[in-house]
Image: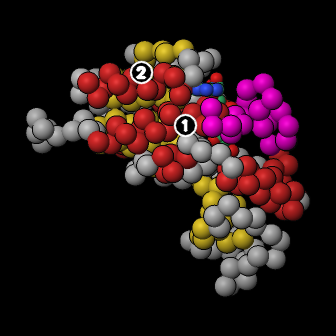
Amino acid sequence: MPKLTNTPRKIVAFTGSGISAPSGISTFRSAGGLWEQHRIEDVATPEGWAKNPELVLQFYNDRRKALSAVAPNEAHRCLAALEERFEVVVVTQNVDDLHERAGSTQVVHLHGELRKARSTLDDTTIVDVGYSAIHIGQMCPRGGQFRPHIVWFGEEVMLLDVARQHITEADRFVVVGTSLNVFPAAALAWHAGATAKKFIIDPDPPETPPGFRVIRGSAEIELPVLTRQWMEKP
Ligand code: OAD
């Protein structure tokens, strides 16, 4: 069906830890990033969980506590503000809640959410734990230990089809703060349509598919520039 002329254009932002870096959240692979300080195998795999669940819970309890002490930055706020004029979907690899706290209403979390716990007995029993710790012995009503609602390496990415659909429909697609290292999520960058206007914002941009305008710089500086342009010239 042809689009009505007054139909707002659709913007999809595909975000990674770099958008939350100016808020004080660690990235994973930059110098001093989380994966320099912790072994992925120990804290972000089902095998790590089987071997030492206390260590895994501690790792994510620390992340959750750190999240409670930070706030969204200008980049998160810009994506929320764009909703005044456009349909905006944020597809994020981040497990923080900074997009939601900035006011974004359509956020697709590919790698789970720090504020949630789910039962090891039943994937559909998911609870909001806020910023509090999950402990050994914290059980669902059926007696399954709660674990972080996070996608570990080797586990299935959440909502991949939903994310892909949004990205294919985007008129404007902006990739912000991801090294595009972790698949299958990273492959989404290749799914924007040929006619979509495509941008990547990153101080150290990864290789992107053809057709992207590369904006070298920090998200909280460059996303406001792009947002102003889009608000003035929808
Ligand atoms: P990475 O640490 O791999 O990449 C962070 C990216 O953000 C890099 O390209 C940086 O250059 C960029 N960056 C740093 N500061 C920035 C700023 N101020 N503004 C904009 N960009 C900035 O993090 P991700 O790509 O998010 O998954 O990592 C993807 C996944 O790997 C994560 O979701 C996580 C991790 O393992 C799981 O744990 C499953």
Q: Residues within 10 Å of mark 2 (few under 14, many from 20)?
A: few
Q: What x and y, as percent, mark residue 100?
A: 49, 51
Q: Can residue 148 be seen in this view?
A: yes
Secondary element under disc 1, as helix, strand or loop, is loop
Q: Which amino acid does label 1 sit on?
A: Asn
Secondary element under disc 2, as helix, strand or loop, is helix
Q: According to the image, label 1 marks what residue?
A: 73
Q: In which quarter of the image is ligand 1?
A: top right
Image quadrant where residue 33 sits: top right
Q: According to the image, label 2 marks what residue?
A: 225
Say above or below: 33 vs 205: below
Identify the residue at horizontal 83%, vertical 45% (top origin). 41
Say above or below: 104 vs 121: above
Identify the residue at horizontal 57%, vertical 29% (top origin). 177
Q: Can residue 123 be seen in this view?
A: no
Q: Is mark 1 within 8 Å of ligand 1?
A: no
Mark 1–mark 2 Cα distance, whole angstroms, equals: 14 Å
Q: What stretch is highlighted in magenta?
A: 22-40
Identify the residue at horizontal 60%, vertical 18% (top origin). 203
Residue 129 relative to residue 168: left or right:
right
Q: What x and y, as percent, mark residue 230?
A: 30, 26
Identify the residue at horizontal 76%, vertical 76% (top origin). 138
Say above or below: 55 vs 161: below
Q: Residues within 10 Å of mark 1 (few under 14, many from 20)?
A: some
Quadrant in which the C terminus appears: top left
Residue 75 relative to residue 65: left or right:
left
